[in-house]
Amino acid sequence: MSKHSIPLAGVIGYPVAHSLSPRLHGHWLQRYGIKGHYVPLEVHPDDLVEVLGAMGRMGFVGANVTIPHKETVLRLADQVTDRATLIGAANTLTFRSDGTIFADNTDGYGFIENLRQRARGWDPRGGPAAVIGAGGAARAVIVSLLDAGVPEIRLTNRTRLRADQLKSEFGARIVVYDWVHMNAMLDGAATLVNTTSQGMEGQTPLKINLEELPKTALVTDIVYTPLRTPLLAAAEDAGFQTVDGLGMLLHQAVPGFQRWFGQRPEVDEDLRNVVLG
């Protein structure tokens, strides 16, 4: 890329029209007066290899990656961060001037930064974290919680096998609970995280009784449509401190933007309002 060219970035997915990333990055480009563009890129799985191979030559400095490509790009990248390897997926690609592709996963970073920014006095080392769900998002959350120093992760998933697989991978600090015993894992927990799509618009709400959860615990949901999920509403009504899932989306975008455009962007109320439209 010549020093006069305008840097391009985008989000690769299939479908991708629903992505809030163009609005998010577009706001930052405008805010910092950066000559650059961030566009949605709908790429069919069959075309992914070809598209990635051409992007650097087209002036792209980077891309975010969403469903269904997050696992595939890990195998296609030339260099991969440790955290992306641990999570088993990448969401942030950088196209280097030598033609190589660098892959990272910033989902866990976004998850933790959201809690640090929006939860008063939250200390990951303060007690066990109860995590609901064992899918791709749960992997990012678990890696980041372990990294932040959570002493124990209590994990439950509708199909126990997936939770057991995560335990075998991440070790002794993970304790698996049967789905029917979900409420029991709340006893003494300092953090409760829902990583499933339950409670999302159009999905059934999560059936959980918060009575066993200490009143000092933090409750968070990684879903942000709606912003106030049934879980967060119930937790708020019961007097718990809660954090919604939108901040995870905003914070996970920071490292990529900084890498591609050379400016560390700010996550603030202004940005939340723009992204919420």
Image (tube, rainbow, N blue to C red):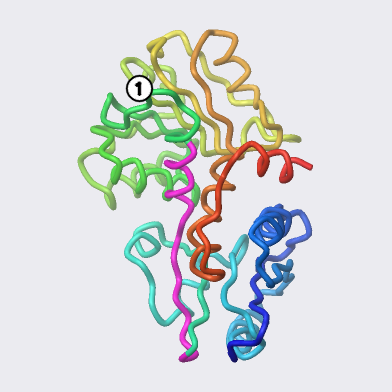
Q: Secondary structure at mark 1?
A: loop
The location of residue 58, given as percent across then percent down, is 67, 87
Q: Magenta segment, which residues?
A: 98-114
41 lies left or right of 249: right
Task: Please determine whether, in this image, residue 270 is positioned above or below residue 257.
Answer: above
Q: Residue at x 68, y 53 (%)?
A: 24
Does residue 172 show up magenta in the picture?
no
Q: Which one is nearer the viewer's eye here, 112 or 272?
A: 272
Q: Residue at x 44, y 76 (%)?
A: 102
Does residue 110 show up magenta in the picture?
yes
Quadrant, the C terminus: top right
Q: Which one is nearer the viewer's eye here, 113 or 142?
A: 113
The location of residue 81, given as percent across then percent down, is 36, 67
Judging by the rendered image, the residue that carries numbered circle 1 is 190
Q: Residue at x 44, y 26 (%)?
A: 192
Q: Residue furthest front?
A: 33
144 lies left or right of 6: left
The location of residue 268, given as percent across then percent down, is 59, 40
Which quadrant of the view contains residue 128?
A: top left
Mark 1: amino acid: Ala
